[in-house]
Image (tube, coloured by chain):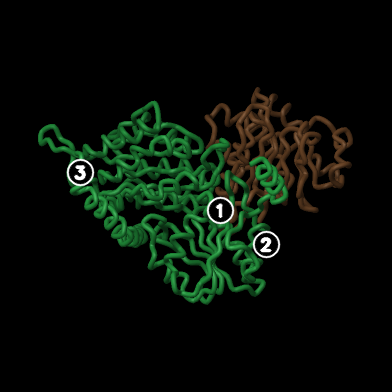
Chain colours: A green, B brown
Amino acid sequence: MLRQVEGSKAVADAVAACQPEVICAYPISPQTHIVEGLSQLVKDGTLPNCEFINVESEFAAMSVAIGASATGARTYTATASQGLLYMVEAVYNASGLGLPIVMTVANRAIGGPINIWNDHSDSMSQRDSGWLQLYAENNQEAVDLHIQAFRIAEEMSMPVMVCMDGFILTHAYEQVDIPTTDEVKAFLPPFVPRQHLDPAEPVSIGAMVGPESFMEVKYLAHQRMIDSAAKVQEVAKDFEAHFGRKTGGLLRSYRTDGAETIVLALGSIIGTLKDVVDELNLDGKSIGVVGLTSFRPFPYEAVAAALKGAKRVIILEKAFSTGTGGIVTQDVARAIEGMGIKDFTVIAGLGGRPITIASLRNYLTNAMAENVERLTFLDLEIDTVEVEINKERALR
Amino acid sequence: MFQVRIHGRGGQGVVTAAELLAVAVFDGGKHAQAFPSFGSERTGAPVVAYCRISDHEIRAREPIMEPDVLIIQDASLIKQIDVFAGLQPRGYVIINSAESAEELQLADKIKVPHSLAILPATEIALTHLGRPVPNAVLLGAFSALTGVVPLEAVASAINEKFKPKIAAGNVAAATAAYEYVMNQVATHA
């Protein structure tokens, strides 16, 4: 049903429609409304077969989720920022054990300095954790990705992070079509684990693996991640057949046919970029957008195909690797190696800095003329930082 | 695209006002996008929320910097921050105050008469609701001044959001504000 609803509430309802059996989470802004919504649905009897487990920390939340998933329960959790970092040890175990947990990351900056606002530093820090990472462009896609995530996770025996921009999406009221439980049931069959903990038929999950096999186990995880790209696509196609919406998948292109310049980005900034690109096209500029939904698995072939024919790609990132630059850029550069496409990176929106249409228009106009550095920090107060840099250097 | 910016203080229901407006617009078959400007959520601290209204899908997510409508839930903010920043030349202004435009010294800030409504929304809320929460009241004024959403849509959004007793008080207060502004407009015309 189409409703005008807060993003967090929409996600809570979508997760509930997937009929999870265990939800375990610790509240942290901007994720809080999601788990509050779910705890309410468990309490009021909307989810009679679901247990909501309160814990004392994010580390416990993921540990309980691991235990629950290992017994064969459909398991969900959500976190953000410092909360994600606090659970990291268990995050790697969830993927290492092949447990199909679905987790929302309500993207938020990482301290210090402490900051509660949106960027992608939290989920990007888990790039190598062995979890799939899908990024939502808007709240409709956030809803749809959660429903797709359970199927991808369970069919691949891999955990999936659904990343949605904190506050910008979680706290925005927009119209969202939230499928009913019955509609979701027709798309998402009950979870049948490949193996599970059962006192009647004891097995051991997570035993120690020594040097003779560890590499092989990790190689299998690598191969599974590569294979999961096909599953992400397949599930998105099937979702479209069921619900009539093109959401999810590996990536989506907008006005890229014959475009000289293509901007590649993840998450909610894609919407703003589409408006800017429309304006620039009206001015006779040749520019399009690629919205990357799947960061892990990274769709090398799909990215190369989407950028083919362009002269340059601009990668807009809401996180960066200190001292080197763009994180997504490294993968995009590998995807387009030898294709003669120049790559530029713009880091934007860190710690909730608004990314305005005016700033984007100005930067992109310069970037189309290649009148920008390879790495730009959008709207950086350059005078302020230069004073600081000079002071610091003088003291060394 | 029609853009609304709401200024108020923590505890006045600024974010709820944007939400109610978005629901009222949605019920009328249009697209709306409401979102708060997120800061530390402290009672009394300045808070801003936004609502975009359009016949088409709304994709842009930047804060609203050039609003068509300003709703100022607390007139003391006028002296404290630049609430009028970026207001469209023909934009609407709705202020919660028992004072006049002269007493508020609005001429220093905007061209008076702007499309302006000043109303004692806190007092109206106290009368009809028994609580000094002016947010829904000002949406009644918004409906009267701009005509962008009918009062009935505002009332149904209020009824969806609140429990019956609080909803009834808010609807009565919003209706009183609607009539107050309609009379003001009629007097000026």
* Secondary structure of residue under mark 3: loop
Which mark identifies residue A210?
Answer: 3
- Residue type marked 1: Gly
**How far apart are the alpha carbons under marks 3 and 2?**
55 Å
Query: A365 left or right of A176?
Result: right
Label 2 CA crowd tier, 10 Å (few <14, some 14–19, many 20+):
few
Chain to which mark 2 belongs: A
Q: Where is residue A157 drawn, in percent x and y? A: 25, 49
Q: Is residue A212 left or right of residue B111?
A: left
CA distance for labels 1 and 3: 62 Å
Badge nearest the viewer, 3 or 2: 3
Q: Looking at the image, which is closer to me, B121 or A79?
A: A79
For label 1, the residue is: B29
Parent chain of label 3? A
Say if labels 1 and 3 share a chain: no
Left or right of A302 on screen, residue A376 = right
| Helix, strand or loop under label 2 | helix
Q: Could you tell me which chain the residue with mark 1 belongs to?
A: B
State whether residue B64 is above or below residue A229.
Answer: above
